[in-house]
């Protein structure tokens, strides 16, 4: 009996020691390199954002943060890889609103559940959309656009960076709220859409401020209105759509950092602290501003709320209009 008691005591002591040691193991995060999955092609704005973020994270976490470009299926392959990765904080993703929110409704056969298979860690950057037109053609204002479109239905067309892009969804929301009709002409990215707008072959386009800025400054595009709640610092003289008469019109693009669902809370806290600190970094804020974006460092709760609200908002527009990927 005495031997048995000693054995039980030794086992209990051993288990207690193991239990006490578990938080210590978790609290040494990170103790190896972290992979930041960028489901975008190398060289683009999203990829540049990922690499700037990786360096900032590395500086704060004391471990290399390696960007991996995993493209394919419009970014779905890269996001799915993260969803199915081990939830230990060593595999993260940078995802724009399209991948994090729009795809939930747009693709009925996603290999993951966006709202259940991830832990949103932080919103890291946002960007404004600006409605631009050709300086040699109408419309010159939101009021004129609505007037012309209503008096001559389908006489105007608009371009976008592709079906279900932020540019497309923003204009569909504008059409829904104003009751106007305009023909959609999708392109494979902003660049070809800009070419067609400058050439006068389309009438308008919702574009990213960063992408359109140089053409606006060169006088090749006319800025009509900004879709955000406040004027953009890079276009201080351009009114918002709300100022132009369409109340409560608020659209902005954003990027979030996601981890697989089930990441330990202490790891979430460590990453959250680093990401919120990055959002306040003068160096990172300047890097974002110079590219037409605004740095953000939100809490995981705010990030999760944004992903859910944006999923609901764009899902309603996609279903109402019948937008598809084709």
Image: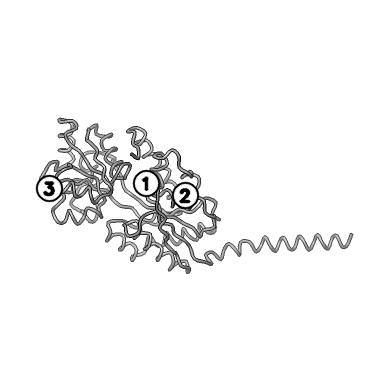
User: Residue 172: image x %, image y %?
Assistant: 28, 37
Q: Are marks 1 and 2 in contact (CB under 8 Å)?
A: no
Judged from the image, the secondary structure of the residue bearing numbered disc 2 is helix
Front residue (pair 148, 227): 148
| Callout 1 crowding tier (Cα within 10 Å): few <14, some 14–19, many ≥20 | many
Q: Which residue carries the number 2 mark? A: 80
| Callout 2 crowding tier (Cα within 10 Å): few <14, some 14–19, many ≥20 | some
Mark 3 vs mark 1, CA separation in Å: 30 Å
Tell me if residue 183 comes above or below residue 6 in the rendering.
above
Q: Are marks 3 and 2 in contact (CB under 8 Å)?
A: no
Tell me if residue 171 comes above or below residue 66 in the rendering.
above
| Callout 3 crowding tier (Cα within 10 Å): few <14, some 14–19, many ≥20 | some
Mark 3 vs mark 2, CA separation in Å: 43 Å
User: Residue 325: image x %, image y %?
Assistant: 35, 40
User: Residue 142: image x %, image y %?
Assistant: 18, 40
Nearest to viewer (mark 3 / mark 2): 2
Q: Quadrant of residue 314?
A: top left
Label whose residue precedes the other's in the sequence (3 or 1)? 1
Q: Residue at x 48, y 43 (%)?
A: 113
Label whose residue precedes the other's in the sequence (3 or 2)? 2
Q: Which residue carries the number 3 mark? A: 135
Q: Which residue carries the number 1 mark? A: 98
Front residue (pair 230, 211): 211
Label whose residue precedes the other's in the sequence (1 or 2)? 2
Q: Residue at x 40, y 43 (%)?
A: 103
User: Residue 124: image x %, image y %?
Assistant: 38, 56
Residue 149 located left or right of residue 126? left
Q: Residue furthest right?
A: 1
């Amino acid at each position: 009996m005495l031997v048995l008691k000693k054995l039980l005591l030794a086992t209990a002591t051993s288990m207690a020691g193991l239990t006490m040691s578990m938080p210590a193991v978790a609290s040494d995060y990170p103790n190896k390199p972290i992979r930041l999955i960028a489901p975008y092609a190398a060289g683009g704005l999203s990829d540049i954002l990922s690499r700037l973020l990786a360096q900032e994270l590395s500086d704060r976490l004391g471990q290399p943060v390696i960007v991996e470009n995993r493209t394919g299926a419009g970014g779905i392959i890269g996001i799915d890889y993260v969803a199915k990765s081990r939830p230990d904080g060593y595999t993260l993703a940078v995802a724009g609103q399209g991948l994090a929110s729009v795809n939930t409704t747009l693709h009925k056969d996603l290999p993951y559940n966006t709202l259940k298979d991830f832990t949103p860690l932080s919103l890291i950057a946002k960007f404004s959309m600006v409605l631009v037109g050709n300086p040699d053609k109408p419309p010159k204002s939101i009021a004129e656009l609505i007037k012309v479109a209503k008096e001559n239905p389908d006489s105007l067309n608009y371009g976008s960076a592709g079906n279900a892009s932020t540019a497309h969804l923003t204009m569909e929301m504008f059409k829904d709220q104003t009751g106007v009709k305009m023909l959609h002409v999708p392109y494979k990215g902003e660049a070809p859409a800009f070419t067609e707008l400058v050439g006068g072959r389309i009438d308008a386009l919702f574009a990213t401020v960063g992408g359109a800025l140089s053409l606006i400054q060169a006088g090749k595009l006319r800025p009509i209105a900004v879709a955000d709640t406040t004027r953009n610092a890079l276009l201080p003289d351009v009114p918002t759509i709300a100022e132009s008469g369409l109340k409560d019109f608020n659209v902005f693009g954003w990027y979030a950092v996601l981890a697989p669902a089930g990441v330990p809370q202490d790891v979430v806290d460590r990453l959250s602290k680093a990401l919120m600190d990055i959002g306040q970094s003068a160096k990172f804020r300047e890097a974002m501003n110079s590219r037409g974006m605004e740095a953000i460092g939100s809490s995981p709760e705010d990030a999760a709320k944004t992903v859910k609200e944006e999923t609901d908002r764009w899902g309603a527009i996609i279903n109402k209009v019948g937008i598809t990927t084709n």
